[in-house]
Image: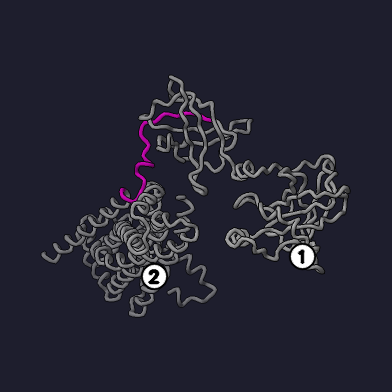
Amino acid sequence: MSARMGHENVVMGSLAQIGRCGLFLLRILSATPRSMRHLTETVRQLWFVGGLSLTIIMTCGLFVGMVLGLQLYHVLAIFGGTSATGSVVALAVYRELGPVVTGLLFAGRAGTSITAEIGLMRATDQIAAMEMMAVDPIAYVAVPRFLAGLIAMPLLCCVFCGMSIFGGHLVAVDWLGVDNGTFWSNMTANVNVWDDVINGLIWKSLVFGAVISLIAVFQGYTTAPTSEGVAYATTRTVVASSIAILALDFVLTAFLM
Amino acid sequence: MSQRKSYAVGTGLFIVLGFAALAYLATQTTSVVNSHQGASYTVDAQFANVGQLKERAPVKVAGVRVGQVESITLEAGKDVADVKLSIDKKFNQIPTDSTAVIYTSGLLGDQYVGLQFGTAKNYLANGAQLVLTRSTQPLEEMLGKFFGAGGAADAIGGSYKVTAHFTNIGALTVGAPVKMAGVAIGSVSDVKADPVKLDATVTMSINNRYNQIPDDSAAAIFTSGLIGSQYVAIQPGGSPNSLKEGDQLVLTQSAMQLEDLIGKFLVSGSSSGSNNAGGNGNGSSNQPAGKH
């Protein structure tokens, strides 16, 4: 709909879109208690958005950790500080790369499938059918996916970080010859549970999870009921989620530091 | 039904894996010990300069962590920092006359508070004050102690300006000290490139008190320590005439590049042509500088 508006209405259109998104969040939250009847649906969605994303998250986490270990080793070697490789890999992954990269991958892997699925439900009038059968589509379709994304993101992010540490260890210790004990002791000395893991990793990934699932569900739910509309909504999910993740990342870092 | 069950199993596996990863990250890769703050008591210490000391920096005895810095505040109305140390209850046998010292871990590491035990039979209790403290040592001061650098000469009493030409002044900046026998006698007031002779003209203002410097003295650019800042050293000559306002120091020795220095040690006797912009080829007057 906003695509048909003129260019002069881009700002107003975006504002309206954000406003509708916020109102949709309120609808989701108010429907959450009602959706507790559909708990098995939430579990099923958790499997789809979380469990099936594990492969890509683990692979990417491994490679991010490996490339970090490789780069940092060579830079730190200039200063004779290769023993800090472990702690820098851990800090970089916990504070920034873990939540952000997991968020971007999650938006691409799970966000798009949520949008496409709900969008097709809309396009094929399944949502209208639910309303006619007095099944609340928000409680049955939107909330389980939203909750699943919210729960899955932090868990995926933890898996991502674990794999990154493993990848960094693989490159730095096994290939480049940093001492194993130094790698771990340096990491444990410089990484703090509250500052880095809880504040950095868990909070950020929770917020990213909420934002990505909200955008995905909202875009699917409000899509134009055509195949073109579904495609457009899917694209917008990725674009909007990516922008939201990167912008929020800065804001959250500024707040949590 | 079996379909739903397989979802449930997969989801359960996913959740367990996620939480296992979280537990692993939280316990194996972080300093649970460091952030743990059990029962503790607070001790005050006042420092003239806390340098880069931060809140939650460790407090150590004999290198072993016993607590952390709780807060750093400025003592009202005084230029001393009030540092509250929160020390673990387990370590309750710290003598009252212990000294609190701010150390740096390594050359570039973080700073921490070290406690050196005294001999008193009484132990520190909650709210006690550590009277004996030693502040952080800025690296400049430490290097200064080794290399005899003093503060800049006081400008009271006026100064006179002399110039010197160098082929290479390295990282010499305006305001760098001018020293004789390691004592600051003035400062660099101007650094310019000479458009004709294609070298650097350094103007130094020297305190009027030092008005008996022979006019055939040599000026050399030295570095205080390995990573210190550069300064101009005046090496007195033997002339009966003294330097006056506007005079030029003819014998100069340019800044030594670290590479040149090492090269000199490795290949003794190979002299690079970077010295002596004065142009009179008096190599012997440069020799003392080379041994620095």
Residue B192 in view, yes or no:
no
Q: Nearer the viewer, mark 1 or mark 2?
A: 1
Q: Give how far across and how far down residue A129 sits, in percent.
A: 24, 70
What is the three-letter code of the residue carrying label 1? Asp
* A62 shown above or below B81: below
Residue A55: percent from left, percent from top: 27, 67
- Tell whether B104 sits left or right of B152: left
Residue sitting at x 47%, y 31%: B116
Give the residues in magenta.
B27-45
The residue beneath circle 2 is A238
At numbered mark 2, what does the secondary structure look like: helix, strand or loop? helix
Query: Could you say which quadrant of the image residue A239 lies in?
Result: bottom left
Residue identified by numbered label 1? B199
Instruction: Name the residue at 40% across, 37% down.
Output: B64
Name above or below for residue A140 compared with residue B219: below
Of helix, strand and loop, which one carries label 1?
A: loop
Q: Is residue A154 visible?
A: yes
Disc 1/disc 2 C-alpha distance (Å):
60 Å
Q: Quadrant of the N terminus of chain B?
A: bottom left
Q: Residues within 10 Å of mark 2 (few under 14, many from 20)?
A: many
Displayed quadrant of residue A24: bottom left
Determine if the magenta segment contains residue B203: no
Label 2 lies in what chain?
Answer: A
Queried whether the magenta region covers residue B32, the answer comes back as: yes
The image shows residue B75, relative to residue B187, as above or below, that is: above
Label 1, residues with CA under 10 Å away: few <14, some 14-19, many ≥20:
some
